[in-house]
Amino acid sequence: MVSAQIELDLNGGWIRLYRKTIQSDVFQNPVIFKVWIWCLLKANHEGRSVCVRTGRGETLVSLQPGQFLYGRKSASKELNLPESTVRDVMARLRKMGNLTIFPDSHYSTISISKWSDYQAKNPTGNPTDNRQATDTNKNVKKRVACANDESFTRFWDTYPKKVNKAGARKIFVTIFKKLTPEQSDQLLTTILNALKNQKHSGQWQKDNGQYIPHPTTWLRGERWNDDVQIQNSKSVGYGFSNTSDNQKGFGL
């Protein structure tokens, strides 16, 4: 017999809550029940990627349906409970088999047990198709923005002249936001390879790097396509071939 259910709305989203929850051990303790509902509401309803600050940089973390990132301090603020209580309750829920905790040095990933069994993808009363499409588009934009930030960090760490980082980021993002993920990966590889070799060019090494262009100038001029003379005096090109229109015109 299928259990009856109610659905809770949260910022346009929802979860399934079964009446048989009343008979569970979780329901007998109000604090544990509160934390458990919080976990259900925090869990992602579909796979997505999120940016996480790790030290000086950022990491792109992939989450599956039924998973969410967890930090004891932020959870304590959201739940209005002491950190020690949050820690103990999460450990209790893990021991009861309600969830699994995957710890990391900077964060933990929580995975709700049997998410696909109890939180079906298309139950009665699900959001409209338009809302789902809007949510999906927002998630895509967030993933693209995060990926571009990560790519820019790699570019900036490689570029030898650290001048006008904000301006360089703006131009970099403008270039990359036009591209598909595959084109972005290809262009980033081209840029990093170009920088690796241009660092050893006579022009960039002359007078302690005095003639290295500012990163904004380098990006705006698509200087990864330059032919440079390296120590073996061979001319090396870094541009895309002209065989595909999709690989042309990455500039502003």
Image (cartoon, grey):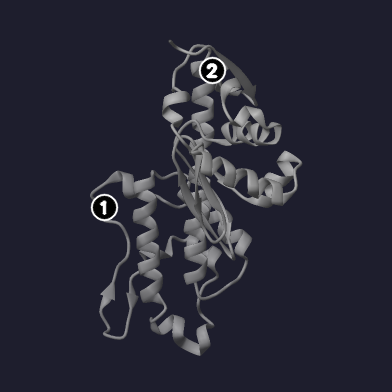
Q: Residues within 10 Å of mark 1 (few under 14, many from 20)?
A: few
Considering the numbered disc 1 on the image, is that residue within a helix, a strand or a loop? loop
Residue, x 58% and y 43% (percent of image)? Answer: 92
Q: Residue 160: percent from the left, percent from the top?
A: 51, 76
Residue 136 in view here? yes
Looking at the rendering, in which quadrant would you find the N terminus? top left
What is the quadrant of residue 170 in the picture? Answer: bottom right
Picture residue at 40% right of the left edge, 84% below the top: 202
Residue 218 seen by the camera: no
The picture places residue 104, in percent across and down from the top left corner, at 51, 57
Residue found at the far bottom of this picture: 207
Q: Nearer the viewer, residue 94 or 105?
A: 94
Residue linked to disc 1: 242
Left or right position of 184 against 166:
left
Q: Is residue 56 left or right of residue 115?
A: right
- Give above or below for 167 relative to 206: above
* Residue at the disc numbered 2: 127
Q: Which kind of residue does numbered mark 2 sit on?
A: Pro
Quadrant hosting residue 29: top right
In front: label 1 or label 2: 2
Query: Closer to the camera, 5 or 19?
Result: 19
| Residue 68, image x, y percentages | 54, 42
The Cα–Cα distance between marks 1 and 2, rounded to whole angstroms, is 46 Å
Q: Secondary structure at mark 2?
A: loop
For the residue marked with disc 1, what is the amino acid?
Answer: Asn
Q: Residue at coordinates 70% horizontally, 51% vertically from top-left?
A: 84
From the viewer's side, name the closer residue of 50 and 81.
81
In the picture shown, does residue 191 fall above or below 171? Answer: below
**Residue at x-position 62% and y-position 66%:** 164
Name which of mark 1 and mark 2 comes first in the sequence. Answer: 2
Check disc 2: other Cα within 10 Å, few if <14, some if 14-19, many if 20+.
some
Identify whether 106 is placed above or below 227: above
